[in-house]
Image: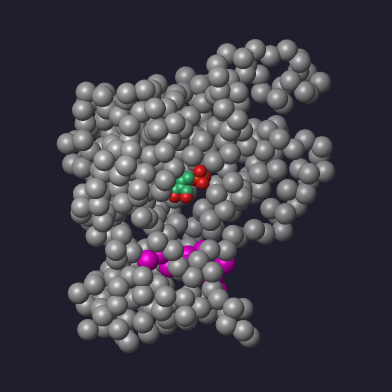
């Protein structure tokens, strides 16, 4: 075997025969874009989470954008967003000409706390966006209480958090609005895709309207036997609808979502055991309040106990054929956020410090016990060779 063939990727999608058959059947059905398969996927998703409304879109970015639009975020408003997140969470705020106000995170869970949010609230704050980092749910009760007390909207970025729960409540039905991602590496994938859930019918209706050009009828109801060609443009909307091809894939993936989560949890628990005696490594946080989605397994290095830094550690893992990633480069360290909003690298010490120590290890349900053991052995080997 060549070194290349032995490389264990950071992620591999778990697509079975049923998914393939569902996509092929949709291709053969003659209806490719948003139609019956999307409606089915939305209904199954809403029922699974026990939430009133689920609107399918073509990414979590679209869901976040439409969610903020639905609650009325507009020019001059502020939206509080963690710096420890992906580009999408904050960029959608700028789509609406509002200002993303970045905040630091808890040093252990890397999620935002009510105590991080409160000092950032101003008269212009319209909404807060808790991000369930890696599938670990934010401590939502104090956040929701604060938001209610200060009349702020909450839009959860649950791109990593399916399925996940907080104090027995499924993510998707906790706050006002929640956005999910079905991007290729996510816990349920449709290649690209997303979903917005809410129990508020006005928000759901607005999101649906704006997801397809602001027109009064969806394409499906225009082109079917029962439909009519006539439509009205009610708003200048967007082109964010999901295809039936993607939805067919998503409906099968949804049926397997807990089985796949159990597979990731098995890998996560094996890592926990495999690293339990390594003082040089901090394992991801746990909480009795959180049913974790196990989207990511981010370890943190203790720099004082190692002779190499995070970047070199990643190189060493790569040399041993292990793919990794880093979640995330905090937003305040990026040129755009520094030049557009004046953020500086010396702000948000918890996120900045975590960034310099973080490595996400491979975590997916199709990993074999041998592959999991390879990752554990590789991490242990790098630690042992480079400990102080
Ligand atoms: C935290 C977070 N939010 C939002 C997104 C955007 O998801 P999508 O690619 O579906 O737009 C991602 C994607 O990686 C993410 O990690």
Seen in the image, is 102 located left or right of residue 225? Answer: left
Q: Residue furthest front?
A: 339
Residue 306 in sight: yes
- Tell me the residue at 17%/36% (across/down): 119
User: For the point 37% across and 55% down, which residue is it?
Assistant: 328
Question: Between 180 and 337, which is closer to the camera in this rendering?
Answer: 337
Q: Identify the coloring.
A: one colour
Residue 304 lies in magenta, yes or no?
A: no
Q: How many numbered marks are there?
A: 0
| Position of 150 relative to 280 (above/below) | above
* 361 in magenta: yes
Location of the C terminus (image quadrant): bottom left
In this image, 338 relative to 206: left or right?
Answer: left
Quadrant location of the N terminus in the rendered image: bottom right
Where residue 316 appears, as percent x and y from the top left, is 41, 79
Residue 314: image location, x then y, percent: 40, 72
Position of residue 256 relative to residue 322, above or below, is above
Q: Considering depth in this image, is 388 or 63 the residue closer to the camera?
A: 388
Question: In terms of image quadrants, where is residue 20?
Answer: bottom right
The answer to whether residue 161 of the structure is visible from this angle is: no
Which residue is located at x 32 percent, y 23 percent? 76
In percent of width and height, residue 358 lies at 33, 64
- Horizontal side of 100 relative to 186 (left or right) equals left
Frontmost residue, 325 versus 70: 325
Residue at (70, 43) in percent of width and height: 245
Q: Position of residue 224 (x, y in %)?
A: 78, 23
Residue stretch in magenta: 359-368
- Say which of 327 and 26 sits in front: 327
- Up-down relation of residue 351 to residue 67 (above or below): below
Main secondary structure found in the magenta portion: loop
């Amino acid at each position: 075997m060549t070194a290349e063939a032995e490389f264990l990727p950071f992620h591999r999608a778990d697509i079975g025969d049923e998914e393939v058959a569902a996509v092929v059947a949709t291709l053969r059905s003659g209806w490719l874009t948003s139609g019956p398969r999307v409606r089915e996927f939305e209904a199954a998703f809403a029922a699974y989470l026990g939430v009133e409304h689920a609107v399918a879109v073509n990414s979590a970015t679209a869901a976040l954008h439409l969610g903020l639009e639905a609650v009325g975020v507009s020019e001059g408003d502020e939206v509080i967003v963690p710096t420890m997140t992906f580009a999408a969470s904050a960029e959608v705020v700028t789509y609406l000409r509002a200002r993303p106000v970045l905040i630091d995170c808890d040093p252990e869970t890397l999620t935002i706390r009510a105590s991080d949010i409160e000092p950032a609230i101003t008269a212009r704050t319209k909404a807060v966006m808790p991000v369930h980092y890696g599938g670990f749910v934010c401590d939502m009760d104090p956040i929701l209480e604060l938001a209610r007390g200060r009349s702020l909207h909450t839009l959860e970025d649950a791109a990593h958090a399916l399925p996940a729960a907080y104090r027995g409540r499924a993510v998707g039905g906790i706050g006002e609005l929640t956005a999910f991602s079905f991007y290729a590496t996510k816990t349920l994938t449709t290649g690209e895709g997303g979903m917005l859930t809410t129990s508020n019918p006005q928000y759901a209706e607005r999101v649906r309207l704006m997801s397809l050009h602001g027109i009064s009828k969806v394409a499906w109801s225009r082109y079917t036997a029962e439909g009519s060609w006539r439509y009205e443009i009610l708003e200048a909307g967007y082109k964010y609808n999901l295809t039936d091809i993607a939805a067919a894939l998503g409906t099968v993936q949804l049926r397997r979502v807990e089985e796949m989560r159990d597979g990731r949890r098995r890998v996560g628990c094996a890592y926990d055991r495999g690293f339990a005696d390594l003082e040089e490594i901090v394992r991801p946080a746990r909480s009795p309040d959180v049913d974790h989605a196990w989207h990511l397994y981010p370890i943190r290095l203790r720099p004082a106990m190692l002779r190499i830094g995070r970047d070199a550690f990643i190189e060493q893992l790569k040399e041993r054929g292990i793919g990794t990633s880093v979640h995330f480069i905090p937003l305040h360290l990026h040129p755009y956020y520094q030049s557009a909003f004046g953020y500086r690298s010396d702000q948000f010490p918890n996120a900045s410090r975590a960034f310099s120590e973080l490595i996400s290890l491979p975590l997916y349900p199709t990993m074999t016990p041998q592959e999991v053991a390879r990752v554990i052995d590789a991490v242990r080997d790098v630690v042992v060779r480079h400990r102080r």
